[in-house]
Image (spheres, grey):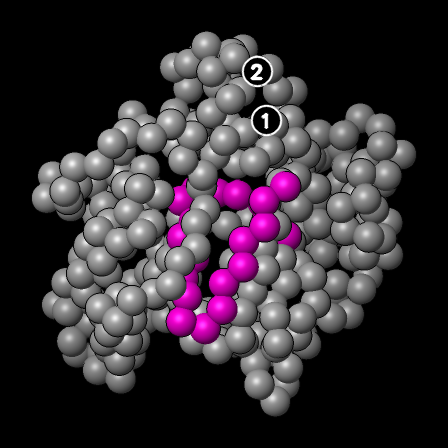
Amino acid sequence: MRTPVPGLLLSRVDSSEQHHSLTEPLLVVMAQGGKRLLLGDRVYEYRAGQCLVVTTDLPVTGHFLDASPRKPALGLGLVLRPAAISALLPDVPPAPRAAGVPAMGTCDADEDLLDAVARLVRLLDRPADVRVLAPLLEREILWRLLTGPLGGVVRQIGLAESGLGHVNRAIRWIREHYAEPLRIEDLARLAGLSASAFHRHFRAVTALSPLQFQKRIRLQEARTLLLARPGDVAGVGHLVGYDSPSQFTREYRRLFGAPPGQDAARLRADAEAVGAPSLP
């Protein structure tokens, strides 16, 4: 749930049901419960008092831990803006450049970070202070991240020429043109890398090959479209780039556990009960 404080998100979830989502650059701090995320073959788990940093748009699968109506999982998120991070980098102590820094990371949230995050949340009760204090608190939170255990991950967001920066150009292209045929040579040229270096950087960041990444984007976009067009499975499959309806149905079922029409009907029936989307 987005809030009146720019970039601040709140989440309350009382189910441990598995879900699929597309992330954005984000800091997530768990206040109660926990969550386990799967990105490719990597597993990330974080619980109350811990945080997750996501540096780019990623297709992830996850479920909350120990979440129930009596004791829901509670978390908050802050959108990580590249420009705000870049502005702080000249003052951050230098660190060795690392190749292949992953696009996600978890760690314990120290007292200073938790204190800054709590003060940002308290601005919801003082709307007159938001315009002046929210940017200052965002800057403090980013500083705590950049100088903490996940500093190497976070700084990638603000470095245009980092491995993430190169891969991000390809990720944006795939997100915007997911239904089009994908050529590794063209994506490598867009990223400013050789084909072999691009493939290596892309997998290091996303834990997926470019083709696997495109397939996840296609299928998650199809799931969204099917909520509005549940009876047009073949049409939706074609819209997201599948020429074969049977291939679309097969790959959709493999990812989501049910054929497209059945899955869409269940999602529509559950839409009101699900409520607002949760954080990654």
Describe the element under mark 2 as helix, strand or loop.
helix
Q: Are marks 2 and 1 in contact (CB under 8 Å)?
A: yes
In this rendering, position of residue 189 left or right of residue 212: left
Please identify the quarter of the rendering in which residue 271 is found.
Answer: bottom right
Image point (40%, 71%), residue name = 49
Q: Residues within 10 Å of mark 2 (few under 14, many from 20)?
A: some
Asked if 225 appears above or below 140 in the picture, the reply is: above
In this rendering, position of residue 207 left or right of residue 48: right
Q: Position of residue 71 (x, y in %)?
A: 57, 85
Q: Position of residue 35 (x, y in %)?
A: 56, 65
Q: Which residue is mark 1?
A: 210
Residue type of the residue flagged with mark 1? Pro
Image point (39%, 15%), residue name = 192
The mark found on residue 150 in the picture is none
- Stretch in magenta: 41-61
Find out whether residue 59 is within the magenta segment: yes
